[in-house]
């Protein structure tokens, strides 16, 4: 099943954008962990729609209802299942999409795969709405990892041509990871945030959208986690991160910049620090060597495409008649996905890291 992730802690996501509810089942959580519900709700609110001028006006509370797996907010060893009710749906906005697919969206490929029986409303189960249950799972695992001294955070590092400061790849602090978490636009540099805001709102005003990139860091992950070849840290994080709709690329450490480097420029010299720990003077490898964590901060960046649902008229096809046609998309959509995608990237990273960490316990 494409909706299941994990070897040790299995995450299953279900529902559609406009179905009665969406949800997640987590099998393999350790018993006896008390979930801080206030912290979880605060995390989910960062992804929830309708909270800023940068997001869709669709308003959903996104408060999970726990059906199993916890007693008095404490995990009990049974599979945890939580649902989120869809309360603000407008399926009429999407009736024509069953026949006329949106450019850039999964409407056409879903129609082919499911032979016309797919749910077209709001993108069905291809919708970014399904990142809400992803964040329920990730929000819980972020708390468990934090209790074990492992911290994960992310920020927008680029929107269009405007770039934010990047994390110091060798010296990322907990404060660095959390300094943007309460901002509507989670950006480190204030001037960059202003320029990004202007860019998003300018595209919104003309019915268009814009993409960008998100940088994520993981600190406190001990050396020795992961495996070579197909089960490396990069592999597992990338698999989970690509479960977020709109992610089109990922790079670790210096990423594609290594294509322009020599070996002496790319290699990170080892040294023993004052505490007797082996570290590297630089972190071009992004905290991963041979698929295994090195003990340095794990740093990766993802490319996020522009929202494909835009108000500008586009060329498409009418599938039943096999004719060319025009399409103007209705409905409520984000002019920029990135502000709400930041916690989704943190959640995906937490899910992948926790699953790998279980193998070393």
Image (cartoon, rainbow, N blue to C red):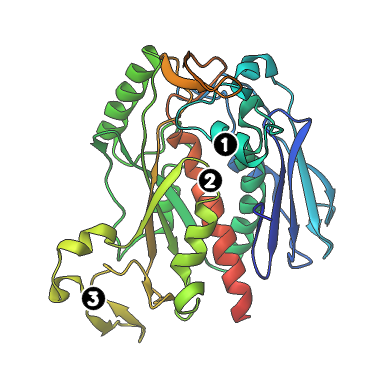
Mark 2 closeness class: few <14, some 14–19, many ≥20 residues within 10 Å = many
The reply to whether the C-beta atoms of the residues labelled 3 and 2 are less than 8 Å apart is no
Q: Quadrant of residue 103?
A: top left
> Of residues 238 and 179, which is closer to you in this image?
238
Q: Please, what secondary structure does the residue beneath circle 2 have?
A: loop
- For label 3, the residue is 268
Mark number displayed over residue 34: none
Give me the residue at 27% from left, 46% from top.
Answer: 165
Q: CA distance from mark 2 to mark 1?
A: 7 Å
Residue 222 seen by the camera: no
Q: Residue at x 25, y 32 (%)?
A: 191
Q: Earlier in the sequence, mark 2 or mark 1?
A: 1
Between disc 3 and disc 2, the foreground one is 2
Q: Position of residue 245 (x, y in %)?
A: 52, 41
Q: Residues within 10 Å of mark 3 (few under 14, many from 20)?
A: some
The residue located at (35%, 60%) in the rendering is 172
Residue 244 disc label: 2
| Cβ atoms under marks 3 and 1 closer than 8 Å | no
Q: Which residue: 64% across, 53% down?
A: 2
| Quarter of the figure with the C terminus | bottom right
Q: In the image, is residue 156 above or below residue 253?
A: above
* Among numbered discs 3 and 2, the one appearing first in the sequence: 2
| Label 1 residue SS | helix
The tag earlier along the polypeptide, 3 or 1, is 1
Picture coordinates of residue 300, whole percent (x, y): 38, 57
* Residue receiving disc 1: 128
């Amino acid at each position: 099943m494409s909706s299941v992730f994990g070897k040790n802690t299995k995450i299953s996501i279900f529902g559609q954008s406009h179905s009665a509810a969406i949800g997640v089942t987590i099998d393999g959580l350790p018993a006896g962990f008390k979930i801080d519900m206030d912290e979880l709700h605060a995390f989910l609110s960062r992804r929830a729609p309708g909270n800023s001028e940068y997001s869709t006006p669709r308003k959903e509370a996104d408060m999970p209802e726990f059906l199993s797996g916890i007693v008095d907010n404490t995990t009990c060893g049974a599979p945890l299942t939580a649902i989120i009710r869809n309360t603000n749906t407008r399926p009429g906005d999407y009736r024509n999409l069953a026949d006329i697919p949106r450019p850039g969206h999964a409407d056409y490929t879903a129609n082919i795969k499911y032979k016309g029986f797919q749910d077209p409303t709001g993108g069905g189960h291809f919708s970014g709405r399904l990142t809400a249950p992803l964040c329920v799972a990730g929000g819980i695992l972020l708390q468990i990892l934090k209790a074990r001294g492992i911290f994960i955070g992310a920020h927008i590092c680029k929107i269009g041509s405007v770039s934010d400061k990047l994390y110091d790849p060798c010296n990322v602090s907990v404060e660095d990871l959390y300094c943007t978490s309460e901002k509507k636009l989670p950006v480190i540099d204030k001037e960059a945030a202003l320029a990004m805001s202007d860019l998003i709102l300018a595209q919104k005003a003309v019915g268009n959208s814009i993409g960008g990139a998100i940088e994520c860091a993981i600190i406190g992950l001990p050396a020795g986690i992961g495996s070579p070849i197909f089960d490396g840290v990069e592999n597992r994080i990338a698999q989970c991160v690509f479960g977020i709709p709109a992610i089109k690329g990922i790079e670790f450490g210096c990423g594609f910049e290594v294509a322009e480097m020599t070996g002496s420029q790319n290699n990170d010299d080892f040294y023993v620090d004052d505490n007797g720990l082996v570290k590297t003077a630089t972190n071009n490898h992004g905290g991963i060597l041979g698929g295994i964590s090195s003990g340095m901060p794990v740093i990766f960046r993802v490319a996020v495409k522009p929202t494909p649902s835009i108000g500008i008229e586009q060329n498409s096809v009418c599938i039943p008649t096999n004719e060319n046609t025009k399409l103007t998309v209705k409905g409520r959509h984000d002019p920029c996905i990135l502000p709400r995608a930041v916690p989704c990237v943190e959640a995906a990273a937490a899910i992948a890291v926790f699953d790998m960490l279980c193998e070393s316990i």
